[in-house]
Image (cartoon, grey):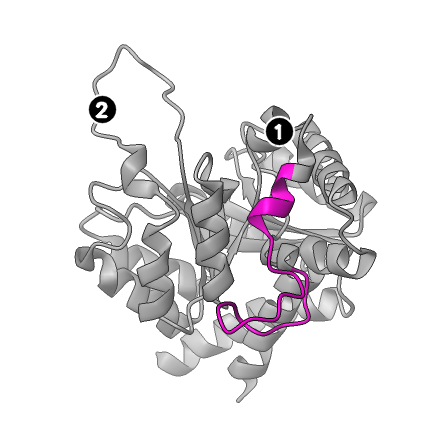
Amino acid sequence: MRLINSLVVLWAISSVCEAQPAAPKIIDCHIHHNGSLAFLDQLSAKLKSVDGVAMLITAPKDLGQVSAFMRQHPGPLIGLGEIQLDAPDVLATINRFQQAGFRGLGEITRPQYPYDDRRYWPIYERAEKYRMIILFHTGIVNRTNPAVASDVSSDRMRPSTLDLIGRRFPQLIIIGAHLGNPDYAWAGEVARWNPNIYFDVSGSTLIKKQKDYAFFESIFWWSGAVSAHTPQSAASAFQKLVFGSDVFDGDLDEFDRALERYRDMLSACQVSQESQARIFSDTLWNILNRGTARAKQ
């Protein structure tokens, strides 16, 4: 069974890398599947038009549909399995996604305890074992039906809760969605000291900060800093960002809007084209290809 599982994962990795032998121009780490087969066709067409790849957040009920589509259309989609941290069968669900060749889990949200609570450690241990990327919602979360009581707290999803996870599971690649909105400073500092933690800046942040994009220079401040108090790297601090659109409900126009906002912000902050290439694609492409090398060993 282990051999079969390994072959399935290797097929899934190879199908992406062989269909897309060079890095695409765009890797979107944060697109929600709406359950519609038509959406998969539309998304694939959109990605083809921009030389892109998407990490598709997929509910367990849609696993069969998405897996079949990925087999028939290798290349543009990478599976992210949607899990609930507090579900009693969460480890079994992770196994299902891994056996289907999915490369990650997410978007994790609305936990009953803070993300770094030790009750969740077996989940992160399993993801690290399978070398699966985890996408966490961070910061304020929407309230879709205010008339209905709910046990949801944005405080449990602060970006600071990723710090312990990143340190305790050093081989686990973590992406925090939304740059911790509004705890941007915490998100930046957590990313600064954890080489396995990145953030996307999807959602409302680049809308509310559109008249002050230079603000982000204060969050990603350590580019070229020479000090014992910051990691030594010649890379731009902005390379702790990856691209995510947070497309949901099939609204692919948001992909274009998010892409434009990212580019405007990075231009305003005078981020080099080399660093932008890493943000939009190369960082995640290299992570995915490291997975390929490990799977072939």
Left or right of 70 on screen, residue 109: left
Q: Single out the residue that lies furthest toward the bottom.
A: 297
Q: Which mark is residue 187?
A: none
Mark 1 packing: few (<14 Cα in 10 Å), some, or many (20+)? few
The residue closer to the viewer here, 49 or 42, is 49
Q: Is residue 297 left or right of residue 150?
A: right
> Residue 137's quadrant in the figure?
top left
- Figure check: 108 above or below 168: above
SS type, badge 2: loop
- The spot of residue 81 in percent (x, y) is 43, 52
Tell me the quarter of the image containing the N terminus: bottom left
Calculate the distance from the C-alpha at mark 1 to the C-alpha at mark 2: 30 Å
Residues in magenta?
215-236
Task: Reply yes or no: does residue 235 show up in magenta.
Answer: yes
Q: Is residue 112 left or right of residue 18?
A: left
Residue appearing at x 76%, y 58% in the figure:
277
Residue holding disc 2: 150
Foreground: 257 or 60? 257
